Amino acid sequence: MDRRRHIAIFTTASLPWMTGTAVNPLFRAAYLEKAGDWKVTLAIPWLSLKDQELVYPGKIAFASPREHENYVRQWVQERTGLISGFKIGFYPGKEHPTRRDITEVIPDEEADIAVLEEPEHLTWYHHGRRWKTKFRRVIGIVHTNYLEYVKREKNGLIQAFFLKHINNWVTHIYCHKIVRLSAATQDLPRSVVCNVHGVNPKFIAIGKDKERLQNGGGGESPTKGAYYIGKMVWSKGYRELLQLLSAHQDELAGFTVDLYGDGEDSDQVRQAAGKLKLAVRVFPGRDHADPLFHEYKVFINPSTTDVVCTTTAEALAMGKIVVCADHPSNEFFKKFPNCRTYSGKKGFVTAVLGALRKASFWGDPGSLRPDEQQRKELGLLLPVGSPG
């Protein structure tokens, strides 16, 4: 008889939408299942074909949940080497708010532990059984700084005031414990700040391979300069980045930065970038592990709306020099020797130019390489090359 406890992970997004709430819960499910101590179900939204066209990049669409499930399993297997044994359940991604009860994805006899990725989002319109009634333990993991996003809208301060109290209310009602990935998030009842995300060992293996080639004389220094990858919406740091570049075009003369992403603001970002004297090139989004990114030296992320940016962690793991804002969302990254934080416009210029002049991180003396504790903090508990 299988006496393993059951963990149900509910999240608000799914592949092929390359966002943190799609990727990190998927890895969480895969590695919890691999540990062998748990039976795991990942619950993800099913979108209508019409909505898939709006959300998923590259005109990717699925005719059935089974087709979507196969895509997700293949994706995670290619990136981890794991044959995923966890279940995948689908809930309607869009339905009438008064009939929203996504807990029905999990049969009552399997209702044990629930992990709510973005608990505020998942409970704003919940109208079914209380989560804490159905499940023995409910843990919320806060990914998104919703208050910061709302403040950028019309009447943002008023909206943020009400949203703050709504978030406090729903998480208090539905969750036993809240894990905030960084202090950049709203302080919620019964919450702790802890980065429970890791990175795929594949990313640090990329950096180690570059280091091995370079130390053995068979590799070259990075041939490309700086880049940023993220969902292409203004609130994800693109506005701040272009403003910083525009204000310091003379100091950054000759500097080239490449932007990668898909999103509703792609055309506007491309137009704004085209008005600068600096070379700012805009490309569609790609997988961050794509060989295209291996030769970049510097990763720039000016976003202050992230909680813990997935692509920043991946860039650090690959050994790139990361330039990011001095902000609570980046507190976890500051301890890594290849992270450069800046404050203010002048600080941005100094950090970028310093990063470009510096030798590639994977070629630095051993004292500057991530130590074993830092590898563990990034979720790399096994030697590089071993599936986590």
Image (cartoon, rainbow, N blue to C red):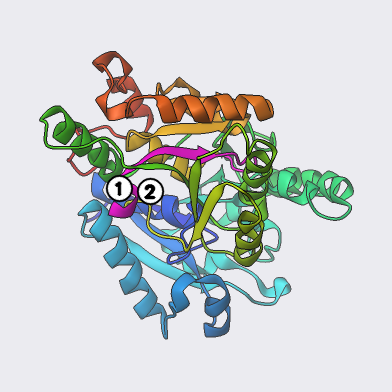
Residue 198 seen in this snapshot: no
Residue 11 screen position, x and y as percent? 51, 58
Residue 240 screen position, x and y as percent? 67, 43
Query: Could you classify mark 2 by the number of other residues whose Cα lies within 10 Å: few (under 14), some (14-19), or many (20 or more)?
Result: some
Q: Quadrant of residue 233?
A: bottom right
Q: Nearer the viewer, residue 223 or 157?
A: 223
Residue 319 seen in this snapshot: yes
Q: Nearer the viewer, residue 80 or 196?
A: 80
Residue 222 screen position, x and y as percent? 30, 38
Tell me the distance, in whole angstroms, between the alpha carbons under discs 2 and 1.
5 Å
State yes or no: residue 32 in magenta. Answer: no
| Mark seen at residue 31 | 1
Query: Magenta span covers which residues?
Result: 290-307
> Residue type at mark 1?
Tyr
Q: Is residue 339 above or below residue 245?
A: above
Q: Quadrant of residue 292?
A: bottom left
Residue 123 screen position, x and y as percent? 66, 57
User: From the image, which quarter does the C terminus lie in?
Assistant: top left
- Disc 2 marks which residue? 28
Task: Say which residue appears at 86% left-offset and 45% top-offset.
Answer: 157
Q: Nearer the viewer, residue 256 or 338?
A: 256
User: From the image, which quarter does the N terminus lie in?
Assistant: bottom left
Q: Is residue 149 above or below residue 249?
A: below
Q: Is residue 384 above or below residue 281?
A: above
> Residue type at mark 2?
Arg
CB-based contact (under 8 Å), mark 2 and mark 1: yes
Query: Could you classify mark 1 by the number of other residues whose Cα lies within 10 Å: few (under 14), some (14-19), or many (20 or more)?
Result: some
